[in-house]
Amino acid sequence: MFNKVLVANRGAVAARVLSALNAMGIASVAVYSEADAGAPYLALATQTYAIGAAPARESYLNTAQLLEVVRHCGADGVHPGYGFLAESAEFAQQVVDHGSRFIGPAPRWLAAMGHKTQARALAAENGMPMARGSVVLPEDPEAIAIIAAEIGYPLLVKPAGGGGGIGMLPVREAAGLLAAVERSRSMAARGFGNAEVFLEQLIERPRHVEFQVLGDQHGQLMHFFERDCSTQRRNQKVIEEAPAPQLPRPQALAMADQIAAILQKMGYDNIGTVEMLLSANGEFCFLEMNTRLQVEHGVTEMITGVDLVRAQILSAAGLPLSQCCDTQVKISGHAIQARVYAEDPKNFYPSPGTLTVFRPPQIPGVRIDTGYAEGRVVTPHYDPLLAKVIVHAVDRDSAITQLLEALRGFEIVGVKHNIPALLNILDSAPFRSGQLHTGIIGEITGRPA
């Protein structure tokens, strides 16, 4: 078991991991940038270390500085949270080479799944259902046009590295193809330092359904059912729920079992999520695999009763799956998570500022994951996520009602926030019906989201 774990992250996920370590009796180390000095979650850590200026590249992405803290404090484990370095094969390998353990999949899995076209090829090779797509596009415009024609329009241009919806551009006819490719390359280069892009079949009005898995270092792997993450703006999730509404249980379980069997055969060895698109005709196809803890892991914890962070840590420590968690999990009730952002509810643009008032509701059964407190500053340097609000109820209607109550109970002054938009979405007829798809926010609001 670990003696001391450094949490290489900030905000809500740092608070979540530090709480899990405390519950397990493991000493913890929190790091913080100048912008996060005095953050409330730092009090959860056994030790804290300043790691640099506010810009992420000077602090949370500064691997040399992080590894120096690991050396200085004697941490034998590093938990990356999500975002930042969580899926960096290079950082994971540096941690291992340093003599510590990376709390996540082996570096080879981060490398294999971190590049979208390589991940698609690996998934297809092992029997995962796939949509039509390409390899990394060449420079030759004529070759690009031929590749696009072979796949067929409409298409989606996607960066081969990175995520978060950045650089994903739809193309509905040949006339707009090359301009979209160049724009996507530019966005990918700025966002991820990698200008490689590829083409993928554009599935109209799909559902975004993902499957949570956990493997160990002894050849065993299991799934924890599915989550529906279709409610998105700019290809980024806003509301997630489990189980997926209006999805027949036999179909959901069959897909979950297939994914688990494939990944167990491949030897996947820690936490991960396989993201799938579900077409209107009921066909699943592989989107990508996230080799880390997900922002929305809490809804799966709620319906299964499994502490996924604890299970992830135990697996990374080398314990067999049977000692990491209950391997006979069942679904209990329904859970929904809403992400509360410091952003304009009309256009979803970030709204940095000082939280002169920040008072989340105190409601039994409502889980609030946050890294903020009243008086803290929401800086433009990081994702503007203020809190994750997670509810669990006997059924979906009850969960929606409880989530609406919780969101209405927030008091936030000093920044704009998206709670008005969340209330509008949750209480709308399309959302209430459970007929979800990735364009549902635009359908509800009447404008692109």
Image (cartoon, rainbow, N blue to C red):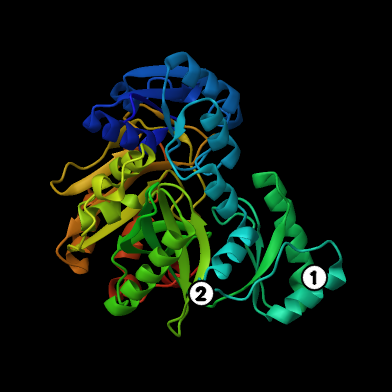
Q: CA distance from mark 2 to mark 1?
A: 24 Å
Viewer-side residue, 362 vs 288: 288
Viewer-side residue, 133 vs 4: 4
Give the image location of residue 170, x and y in percent.
64, 69
- Residue drawn at x 56%, y 57% as measured from the top left: 165
Mark number for residue 144?
1
Q: Secondary structure at mark 2?
A: loop
Give the image location of residue 311, x and y in percent.
30, 44
Q: Secondary structure at mark 1?
A: helix
Give the image location of residue 217, x and y in percent.
40, 46
Give the image location of residue 42, x and y in percent.
35, 23
**Residue at mark 2:** 129
Disc 1 residue type?
Answer: Ile
User: Can residue 433 be seen by looking at this rendering?
Assistant: yes
Determine whether 327 is above or below 258 in the image. Answer: above
The quadrant the N terminus occupies is top left
Quadrant assignment, res 225? bottom left
Viewer-side residue, 100 vs 164: 100
- Residue drawn at x 56%, y 41% as measured from the top left: 88
Q: Residues within 10 Å of mark 2 (few under 14, many from 20)?
A: some
User: Can residue 410 be seen by looking at this rendering?
Assistant: no
Which residue is most to the front? 218
Viewer-side residue, 155 vs 38: 155
Mark number for residue 357?
none
Asked whether the beta carbons under mark 2 and mark 1 sit within 8 Å of each other, the answer is no
Q: Is residue 53 left or right of residue 249?
A: right
Q: Is residue 418 left or right of residue 108?
A: left
Whichever of labels 2 and 1 marks the residue nearer the N terminus, that label is 2
